[in-house]
Image: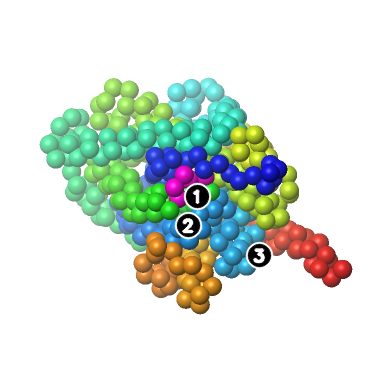
Amino acid sequence: MSQSEAPLARNLRNRHIQLIAIGGTIGVGLFLGSAKAIHEAGPGLLLAYAVGGVAIFFIMRALGELLTYRPVAGSFATYADEFCGPLPGFITGWSYWFAWVVTVMAEITAIGIYVNFWLPQVPQWLPPLIALLVLYGANLLAVRVFGELEFWFALIKVVTIVALILGGLLVILLHVGPLGPSARFSNLWSHGGFLPAGMVAVLLSLQIVMFAYEGVELIGVTAGEAENPAVVLPRATNGIIVRILIFYLGALLIIMALVPWTELDPKVSPFVAVFGKLGVIGAASIINLVVITAAASSCNSGLFSTGRMLWTLAQRGQAPRAFAALNARQVPAAGIHASAAVMLIGVALNYLVPERVFTIVTSVALIGTLWTWGIILISHANYRRAVAAGRARAAPFRMPGAPLANWLVLAFLVLVAVLLAKRPDTRVALYVAPFWFGLLLAGYALWRAPAAAARTT
């Protein structure tokens, strides 16, 4: 069997998949992006996270059903190809690759910002470069190395948020520590009300909220390398709603109950600010390290997923054949090389526009992610129709509320995309989108032309 024909190794164990699923929902969007969102929407941000969380729940249940039908590394790109056609499959695979490449640019930007917390004299572009090179090297090793790295990265994030929630509850209920006298749940509505800037501000915060949820679909990419996908993947998918309640709504609720939202700096992670105010020695530095770990985790996931997606596209003939080969460790090294090279643009942006790069790249990344989530919902609806017609096998793990939930959530994703036009710093994503999708349509036409010519000869 040649390297291009060899399958990916199923070396990701249950504990890897479970922590990857958890880690995928906790990233810089929560640790860093929530600071600006709290400043603009106040406690009403919780409403945005709740509504977004409901949408994510249905997206993940749709993906979970497709995964139990056919657990493959190409995941949603493969399902789009099978149930929507080769063009949607082509666009989905490349758009997901694009989304993660740009997301990594945001994550390494966060690393640069938070290293400057300790070392303000270090240029913002240098830590992103070092982080990218280290994680690039790690991803060229066996997939078990990626799994172990992501397991420990995710565990650090989980322990930190649980500590914040439990410690915060202790302060609020028993009024202990420096924040004890002022910490109370009434802080959620005592400073201008629960919606101090109105529903418009809540709607506009959906950009950073949905970016924060980006990565939950990563378990779909791990499907081709999971040891027991039929058992592990439904379990990880089912836990998504619990993770949303605990790690997003729970953490942000406690933060804004401990410290009035009006006192949180939009340029400082609320996690760093709150732990510092709790009086824990070295708390700000500890949380700063955790935020850097969270960013490194997402960068790690980005290198993993982009390499696998290019491998899947090449397997279907929709990317250069060089990306279809695996190295001796059964890793799609060529795809990782190419992805890391494009991610270096993020380092350049941190050199050229360090103040604006985070908002720009998170907005652009969201375009590819919204497409991916939307195609999951459409593929699932078409899959259900195929099952009803007897053309596909019914999966044992089913999404509730279909097909109505599919179309309602799809409408919500369209609303999020439209809202990007309302702010100058997120509007850039809508400028990039036509160019990107136009490029993909041209690429698809060029890819199809040789095949059509071969059929006519």
- Residue at image x 63%, y 51%? 312
- Residue at image x 30%, y 57%? 195
- Residue at image x 51%, y 77%? 389
- Residue at image x 42%, y 46%? 21
Instruction: Mark 3 vs mark 1: give the one in front.
Output: 1
Type of amino acid at the residue the image marks with label 3: Leu
Rendering colour mode: rainbow
The residue closer to the viewer here, 246 or 73, is 73
> Label 2, on which residue?
67
| Label 3 residue SS | helix
Segment colored magenta: 225-229
Between the residue at mark 1 and the residue at mark 2, the CA separation in whole angstroms equals 7 Å
Q: Where is residue 292 in the image (x, y as percent from the top left)?
A: 45, 32
Query: Few, some or many C-alpha atoms within 10 Å of disc 1 (few <14, some 14-19, many ≥20)?
Result: many
Type of amino acid at the residue the image marks with label 2: Leu
Instruction: Mark 2 vs mark 3: give the one in front.
Output: 2
Q: Where does the N terminus fall, quadrant-wise?
A: top right
The residue closer to the viewer here, 170 or 274, is 170
Lateral position of residue 415 relative to residue 176, left or right: right
| Label 1 residue SS | helix
Please indicate, yes or no, whether residue 439 appears anywhere in the rendered image. Answer: no
Between the residue at mark 3 and the residue at mark 1, the CA separation in whole angstroms equals 23 Å
Question: Could you tell me if the residues under marks 2 and 3 are in contact, i.e. CB atoms within 8 Å?
Answer: no
Tell whether position 226 is magenta: yes
Above or below: residue 113 compared with residue 366 = above
Question: Could you tell me if the residues under marks 1 and 2 are in contact, i.e. CB atoms within 8 Å?
Answer: yes
Q: Where is residue 217 in the image (x, y as percent from the top left)?
A: 47, 52
N-terminal label among 3 and 1: 3
> Label 3, on which residue?
87
Please indicate, yes or no, whether residue 134 appears anywhere in the rendered image. Answer: yes
